[in-house]
Image: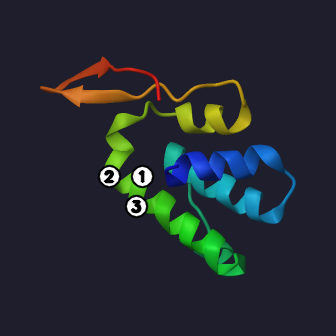
Amino acid sequence: MDALHEALKKIRSNPSDPTASTLGDLIKSLDSGERFDLNKLYALNYSDFSLAMGILKQWRLDSYRYERGLLRKAMEDPTAKLDVTSLRYGQWAESVPV
């Protein structure tokens, strides 16, 4: 499972958990361009911190593939699917849902 899906699973399973809140804030920030307080990451245990770093790595590599606002929607709605869009020859084209 990739970092984003692992984080979404953690957030959906216990949204009131402080770790889920921090991961959710990180995803919202990456998705919207809003500011994120990096100090929140230091409150995470090592495995959750590693998960957050995985989210950052995945976002860095895949940020062009996801429609803006889609990650927030997927985080808030367990039934929402991540429909990946890919950049092909300078045009956005929808691909198979992940």
Residue name at image x 47 percent, y 29 percent? 98
In terms of secondary structure, where does tag 3 sit?
Answer: helix
Q: Which residue is mark 3?
A: 57
1 and 3 marks in contact (CB < 8 Å): yes
Mark 1 nearby-residue class (10 Å; few <14, some 14–19, many ≥20): some
Q: CA distance from mark 2 to mark 1?
A: 5 Å
Report the amino acid beneath label 2.
Leu
Instruction: Tell me the element at label 2.
Output: helix
Q: Nearer the viewer, residue 23 or 35?
A: 23
In screen coordinates, is 65 left or right of 8?
left
* Colour pattern: rainbow
Residue 91 seen from this side: yes
Residue 1 coordinates in the image, percent (x, y): 52, 49
Q: Residue at the spot x=63%, y=80% of the render?
A: 46
74 to the left or right of 62: right
Q: Which residue is denoted by mark 1 in the rendering?
A: 59
The residue that label 2 is drawn on is: 61
Q: How far apart are the two marked residues, 1 and 3, measured between alpha carbons? A: 5 Å
Total labels drawn = 3
Task: Point out residue 60 in the picture as x, y percentages from the top left corner.
Answer: 36, 55
